[in-house]
Image: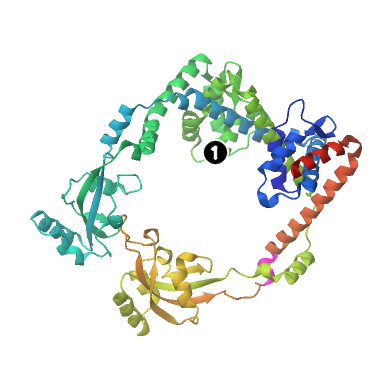
Amino acid sequence: MGKFYLLGILFALGCGGGDEDPVLAKIGDVEITAAQLRGYAARLPEKLKGDMSGAYRTYLQDFIDKELLLKEARRRGLDQGKTLRRKLAREQQEHVLNVYLKREVYGKVAVTDEELRAQQQATGRDRAVQVRRVVVATRGEAEEIVQQLRAGADFDDFAGRTLLESTMLQGGKFLIKDNMYPPVLQKAVFPLAAGEVSEPVEFNDQYGVYQVVEDSPVELESVLDLLTEELYKKKVPPMLEALVARLRSETEFSADDAAISRLVERLEGGRTLTEAERDDALYRYRGGRFTAGEFVDYAADSKVNLGSDPAERVSWFATKAIVPRILLLAGAGATDIANEAEIASRSKQREESRLLVEMRRAAVADVLVEEGEARQFYEQHPRFFRPLEALTVQEILVRSAEEAAALMERVARGEDMGELAEAHTLRLQGKGQQGVFHVHVFETRHRELLEAAQASRAGELVGPVEVEATPEEIVDADPLGTGNRFYSLFKIVESTIGAGPEPFAKVERRARALVRKVKKDRAFHQFLLDLRYRYTSEIEIYDERLEDLAAEGQV
């Protein structure tokens, strides 16, 4: 029984039927009903659904197996493991806390149309602009262009001087100020009135001169989600702070400074806390306490390092995370959220899901793989050990065919290609690596390189090849530019296309892992068969009801 089926069954078990829902099977005191199987079947992808006459019996067996696994896990006491209980408690706390915050903070945030319109105007999102630009190599050249434009020169007169393919940003679309654009452009370009020219804008050692060609009003609906998100970010923090302050008073919260100092001293000594030290209460509130052990566990779960400067880190983490969390959980605990049917059902499903994982882990814990088994698998299945088909290339990527041809001549004359790549290549992948990077055959973004390489030999210089590259791949791309055609000269450094399997010594760990998976699957299947046999007397299946359900499915 696969993981997919186990998780699907867990969901279905939360959807039992009423009094008229026929029971199809019992495992001890646990009943499996027709409604649970119907719900389970309905949620399966079509490709996993079989002939319903036999499928329902298979689904029922999956449900039974799940109950047997849980029964055996509890018999072994796996449900009482400290690590499991701590993880489950943390998950439950997080869920209850999220529900509480949604009701007490997020659900109470109100955003009016007036606030939205004010935010739209304040952030300049009440207009969209059509922008063109000229990009040049030096500030002096950019300043000269600005002066001439402001003196009445025609912008089109400078189009031939731009380092990019087009002067229009994003093909002439009207642009709305958004966080996707760099702050320097938000500040220098979007506030310009129609016809105005920006000061030179520097980016990636180039300089752009921008002009707003035309602007257009923006309807509120077009930016509603963005504005709402921004207003929520403004409104939520003070509401959250007010709630925490109220809870601090209502819960009679107090901190034990001496206990906190003891924790800091132990962390400074680099010691692992003893059980007694873990139980040292750092904070108290009505009906509860928060210990040193809980503090260090939560820091570890949050990947917060307390050891670099314990006094400062403990104080910071307590203020920013621990104390607000304690108070909010105390507030949530004063409600009945944890006992609500939906929350309780989710908690039960999460516990059973983790318990099934623990049971499977325990069932296959003794599986070992010998070297001979791994080698035999390697020899019988060489396809699993072939390297990914890829090329290692050394490339120089430039903007024009003329520049690429000139660089090819320099390489042909004996100049070092790696040094030329460092000086001229525009592709981020090879920058700092003398132009060397890997190209996998499944990467569609390198299609032109792969096609050109097919007829080439290792070490042969190829090019110029016209290729496409996105701004994210380019060192000095205009953040709002549209030019994406470049010219590449490259040579193949290494190729694994069509290569045989790698040496066993190199892939032995992978071979062992693959064999281990096969052996674990077999061991777990045998474990399930043993459970079915061991608990036979506790399993009762009502075949006639199951047949009625199957007949219903056929109709």
Above or below for 282 versus 145:
above
Look at mark 1 in the image and give the residue it sits on.
302
Hey, which quadrant is residue 338 in on the image? Answer: top right
Identify the image quadrant of the C terminus: top right
Classified by dominant secondary structure, the portion drawn in magenta counts as helix
Name the residue: 65% across, 35% down.
Answer: 87
Helix or strand or loop: what does disc 1 sit on?
loop
Residue range highlighted in magenta: 503-509
Above or below for 265 versus 491:
above
Q: Is residue 254 left or right of residue 530?
A: left
Name the residue: 78% across, 59% down.
Answer: 369
Residue 497 x %, y %: 57, 74
- Amino acid under disc 1: Ser
| In front of the other: 254 or 164 | 164
Residue 59 x %, y %: 77, 44
| In front of the other: 120 or 385 | 120
Q: Is residue 507 left or right of residue 311?
A: right
Name the residue: 22% across, 57% down.
Answer: 133
